[in-house]
Amino acid sequence: MIQPGTDRVCVTGATGFVGSHVVQALLARGHRVRAVVREPDNEEKTAHLHGFSETADHPLEWVRGDLLEPGSFDTAVEGCAGVIHVAARARLTAKDPQREIVDPSVAGVRNILGSVERAGTVRRFVQTSSIAALFSRPEKNKVYDEDAWNDDATLKTDPYGLAKAEAEREVWRFQEAQGADGGCSVVVINPGYVLGPVFNTRHSKASPIIVRNMLRGKMPVCPKIHLGLVDVREVATAHVEALERETVSGRYVVVHESRWLREIAAALRVICPDRKISSRTMPNVLMYLASIIDSTIDRAMLRRLLGRAVQFDNGRSRADLGLVYRPIEETLKDTVDSMARARLI
């Protein structure tokens, strides 16, 4: 579909945790990559990408773009055959969830798709969605696959899930509007909770923050929450395969396996025996009481997730994208090692 070394690929959110790994994977495959960021001159955010570029077959291109500025992606998309849209606001709660969580995701997708239409050169558009677009509150004994949709999220109960579901629907409306003969095909990646090697402090404050907090003793007890985990390198590979493979289509659940927080903590205790990592589970009733005292604990999230196991079917990602998932213990160890190298723990 998109040929390494010949076609140019635009990646939004290139300096983020997932976006950085996507850029690294593309460059390793020999792709010509155009990185879209809000602050191309911010060395603190871009230094690791410059490092990738130094050993790549083709130098990394830099273009500015902003989710909320209409037309700001036009220059970035111009002349590109592939677009991977990773950029999004990864916030679970906010004082104004519509403005701070939902609007950036939905308006951002409309913005980039408008640029894709105007460019007229894009043959494959890959959207980074989330398992949050599949469900809001896990149903008992249900295994989630690509047919699931989060129809229950509201601004009050699950603004992040609402943002992810609505942004993805925008992408599918774009695909439908093109018709059968449309020149740009769409593929969506729905990753789970992403862990793996970080490149800087900002990345450690994204989803890997759970590991960092456990290592630093900032999580004395573990809420009874079940997470569908995946390595960021598998997520990056999924995006590249979705870009390159002619026959892939639709959505892809990219999750390896699910674990309780106490199980993650127990695995980290084995990896880091010298650190005091608690794997004690906090009773649900005490979590609710804590949310009354501590305003940073999202009570709506507790009502949705606390004590609810969740399972996923990743069969399509294995069959169509050829993904081979590495052991979660390896993912956790590599996450820890990267934080240690960067002196973040």
Image: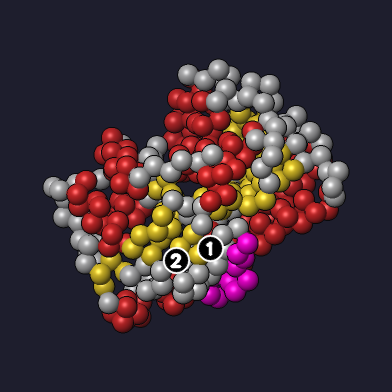
Residue found at x 16% / y 55%: 276
- Which residue is under mark 2? 310
Expressed as whole percent of the image width and height from the top left, the position of residue 205 reads 39, 50
Q: Which residues are magenta?
A: 147-162
Q: Secondary structure at mark 2?
A: loop
> How busy is the neighbourhood of tag 1: few (under 14 within 10 Å), some, or many (20 plus)?
some
* Colour scheme in use: secondary structure
Q: Secondary structure at mark 1?
A: strand
**Above-or-below relation of 137 to 63:** below
Please state, as top left, top right, bottom left or bottom right, where the C terminus lies in the image: top left
Residue found at x 55% / y 75%: 156
Amino acid carrying mark 1 in the image: Tyr
- Which residue is under mark 1? 144
Judge by depth and name the residue closer to the eye, 150 or 212: 150
Mark 1 and mark 2 in contact (Cβ < 8 Å)? Answer: yes
Task: Count how many numbered circles sit on residues in the image.
Answer: 2
Residue 78 magenta-drawn?
Answer: no
Residue 151 magenta-drawn?
Answer: yes
Residue 173 in view: yes
